[in-house]
Image (cartoon, helix red, strand yellow):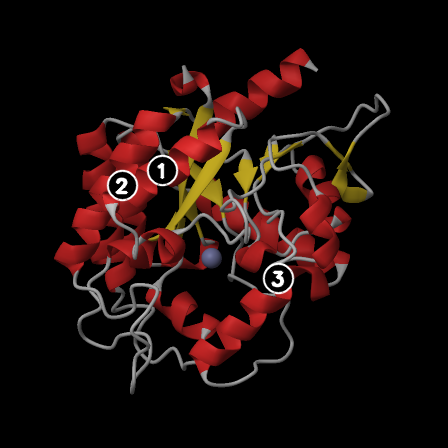
């Protein structure tokens, strides 16, 4: 039945400083005093342990400068999780960088993970911002997959929603990809290195797997906690069953803040929007996370993406 369709559960470990930056809020002490790490990662780990699933944590290199965060990351590694590269500085607008800047983000982020003993082979650009230069850089660095592409036409809508949440428009960034990525495949594929959204047709030596981020049927919003937290178990099950019926592998993307108590305003200092989990308590989030992960594991065969990509490249 549908249990044979592979599914991937991945977490972007955006520290509180990175989340605040997403919404144009100053960092203050949120790099060192960071509940997304101390609480969020721990809670997600326990949800995954209880569900008995393999997941991946995508880590920002800069966070590995702190002893406390390095200890948590090492623990994840020892527990058998895949660790992926989420860039060195969580640069929102990676494709606005020069080729050298992209290379720096990838290699410095990579080195930070290697120093704690990980061997990352997967990358996700902050804000789903990927282009052919990013892919070429990843191939050059020996990566096996990229998981940055959001196959949706809803990018402009999501950017407006983001600005509305932030209370302002923030320049110098690029998020939620290009409109043309709405035409990209919604299942893992091997892209043309010079045209990310197209599957390759020629047999070249340089290859990498593109693992698109899951999108909801219909509106094609990112399959993240923001989309799933407001739903009941029945609606979540119905959604996953509909997705699994299409027989396409699906990537469920979570964030460290999804496991972090937000009953105090930690992201927005003043009025906090009552949506996307920004006001949910840690306990309420934990209940929803357990439900979401259980239902996902009931509809998909949860698989490590690094193993999946390696097999896909070997069988090409
Ligand atoms: Zn991120």
Q: Quadrant of the C terminus?
A: top right
- Callout in the foreground (3, 1): 1
Which numbered disc flags the more N-terminal residue, 3 or 1? 3
Rendered location of residue 277, percent (x, y): 29, 63
Crowding around mark 1 (Cα neighbors within 10 Å: few <14, some 14 to 19, many 20+) is some
Rendered location of residue 220, percent (x, y): 55, 50
Examine the image and state in which quarter residue 170 appears.
bottom right
Can residue 1 be seen?
yes
Q: CA distance from mark 2 to mark 1?
A: 6 Å
Which numbered disc flags the more N-terminal residue, 3 or 2? 3
Which residue position holds label 1?
Answer: 238
Q: Is mark 2 within 8 Å of ligand 1?
A: no
- Which residue does the image show at 30% across and 57% down from the upper left? 230
**Which one is in front, 248 or 163?**
248
Asked if the residue under mark 2 is in contact with the one under mark 3, i.e. CB atoms within 8 Å, the reply is: no
Q: Quadrant of the N terminus?
A: top left
Q: CA distance from mark 3 to mark 1?
A: 25 Å
SS for dot 3: helix
- Callout in the foreground (3, 2): 2
Asked if the residue under mark 1 is in contact with the one under mark 2, i.e. CB atoms within 8 Å, the reply is: yes
- Compared to residue 289, the image places residue 33 above or below, namely below
Can residue 68 be seen?
no
Which residue position holds label 3?
Answer: 155
**Which one is in front, 208 or 186?**
186
- Which residue does the image show at 64% across and 14% down from the upper left? 314
Which residue position holds label 2?
Answer: 234
- Compared to residue 247, the image places residue 108 above or below, namely below
């Amino acid at each position: 039945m549908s249990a044979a369709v592979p599914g991937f559960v991945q977490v972007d470990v955006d520290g509180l400083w990175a989340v605040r930056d997403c919404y144009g809020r100053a960092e203050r002490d949120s790099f060192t005093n960071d509940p997304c790490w101390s609480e969020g990662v721990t809670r997600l780990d326990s949800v995954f342990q209880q569900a008995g699933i393999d997941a991946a944590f995508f880590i920002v290199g800069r966070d590995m400068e702190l002893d406390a965060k390095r200890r948590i990351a090492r623990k994840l590694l020892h527990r058998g999780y895949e660790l992926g590269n989420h860039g060195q500085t969580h640069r929102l607008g990676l494709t606005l960088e020069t080729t050298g800047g992209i290379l720096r983000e990838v290699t410095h982020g990579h080195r930070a993970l290697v120093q704690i003993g990980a061997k990352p082979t997967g990358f996700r650009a902050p804000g789903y911002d990927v282009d052919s230069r990013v892919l070429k850089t990843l191939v050059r660095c020996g990566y096996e997959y990229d998981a940055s592409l959001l196959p949706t036409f809803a990018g402009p809508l999501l950017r407006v929603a983001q600005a509305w949440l932030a209370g302002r428009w923030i320049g110098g960034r690029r998020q939620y990809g290009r409109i043309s990525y709405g035409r990209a495949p919604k299942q893992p594929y091997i892209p043309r290195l010079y045209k990310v959204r197209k599957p390759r047709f020629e047999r070249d030596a340089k290859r990498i797997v593109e693992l698109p981020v899951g999108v909801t049927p219909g509106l094609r919003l990112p399959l993240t906690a923001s989309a799933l937290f407001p739903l009941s178990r029945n609606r979540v099950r119905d959604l996953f069953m509909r997705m699994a019926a299409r027989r396409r592998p699906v990537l469920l993307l979570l964030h460290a803040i999804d496991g972090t108590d937000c009953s105090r305003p930690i992201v927005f200092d003043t009025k906090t929007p009552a949506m996307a989990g920004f006001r949910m308590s840690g306990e309420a989030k934990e209940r929803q996370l357990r439900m979401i992960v259980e239902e996902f594991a009931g509809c998909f065969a949860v698989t490590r993406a690094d193993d999946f990509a390696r097999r896909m490249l070997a069988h090409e």
